[in-house]
């Protein structure tokens, strides 16, 4: 490989250092909060160079190549919790709490847990992993998000934007059609 090809690979890696990944099943009401959060983020903001926003749906190991070698991985997901009110949001730094996913808290997190475990084994784990967990009010079959989860999505996005700003990144608000 010549130096020009090497430079192209390096540039591509630099452009994808940060991944914002929404996870969830949009057919189970609030379980789709993470996916709907990234949809809202894409609708409302233009991301700066180096930030990728992706709908991960209910994918598991298929996400391995997408997650590997990132500097920052931001996850948005529904998070079951008996102690928190529906619509509440928790921010968990998984870089500091790597054992968090040992307890299954949503139907697809076993797949995510396995993906993160593989990145750890293969030394391709993102350096920084942050989860914004949105407490669902309903997991009934249906595509509508409850008002509580909608409020949680807004809170999670505000938290994410603050984290991006702390990294010196400024997403640009898109002009909204009135």
Image (cartoon, rainbow, N blue to C red):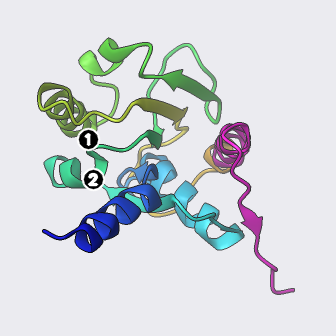
1 and 2 marks in contact (CB < 8 Å): yes
Residue at screen point 27% across, 33% down: 125
- Residue in view at x 81 percent, y 86 percent: 177
Disc nearer the start of the sequence (1/2): 2
Does residue 18 lie above or below 9 as drawn? Answer: above
Element carrying mark 1: loop
| Residue 130: mark | none
Quarter of the picture containing the N terminus is bottom left
Q: Is residue 27 visible?
A: no
With 32 as the anchor, is 9 left or right in this view? left
- Residue 5: image location, x then y, percent: 24, 72
The label on residue 58 is 2
Q: Mark 1 points at which residue?
A: 108
Residue sitting farthest toward the front: 3
Q: Which quarter of the figure is the C terminus placed in?
A: bottom right
| Label 1, residues with CA under 10 Å away: few <14, some 14-19, many ≥20 | some
Q: Give the range drawn in magenta.
A: 153-178
Q: Is mark 2 on a helix, strand or loop?
A: loop
Residue at horizontal 20 percent and vertical 53 percent from the top:
65
In the image shown, does 53 or 7 lie closer to the viewer? 7
Q: Is 2 positioned to the left or the right of 140 in the image?
A: left
Q: Nearer the viewer, residue 88 or 73?
A: 73
Q: Is residue 169 magenta?
A: yes
Can the viewer see residue 114 in this picture? yes
Seen as rendered, the residue at the extreme bottom is 177
Which quadrant of the structure image shows residue 175?
Answer: bottom right
Could you tell me which residue is drawn at 36 percent across and 57 percent down? 13
Which x, y percent locates residue 136?
A: 52, 38
In the rendered image, residue 25, in percent from the top left (x then y), is placed at 35, 54
Percent across and percent down for residue 112 are: 25, 38
């Amino acid at each position: 490989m010549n130096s020009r090809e090497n430079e192209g690979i390096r540039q591509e890696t630099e452009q994808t250092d940060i991944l914002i990944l929404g996870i969830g099943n949009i057919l189970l009401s609030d379980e789709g909060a993470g996916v709907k959060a990234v949809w809202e983020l894409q609708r409302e903001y233009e991301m700066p160079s180096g930030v990728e926003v992706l709908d991960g749906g209910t994918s598991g190991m298929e996400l391995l190549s997408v997650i590997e070698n990132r500097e920052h991985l931001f996850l948005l997901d529904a998070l079951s919790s008996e102690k928190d009110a529906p619509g509440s949001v928790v921010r968990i730094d998984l870089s500091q709490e790597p054992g968090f996913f040992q307890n299954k808290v949503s139907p697809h997190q076993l797949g995510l847990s396995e993906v993160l475990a593989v990145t750890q084994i293969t030394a391709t784990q993102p350096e920084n992993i942050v989860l914004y967990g949105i407490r669902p009010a309903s997991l009934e079959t249906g595509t509508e998000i409850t008002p509580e989860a909608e409020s949680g999505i807004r809170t999670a996005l505000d938290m994410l934007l603050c984290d991006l700003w702390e990294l010196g990144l400024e997403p640009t608000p898109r002009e909204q059609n009135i």
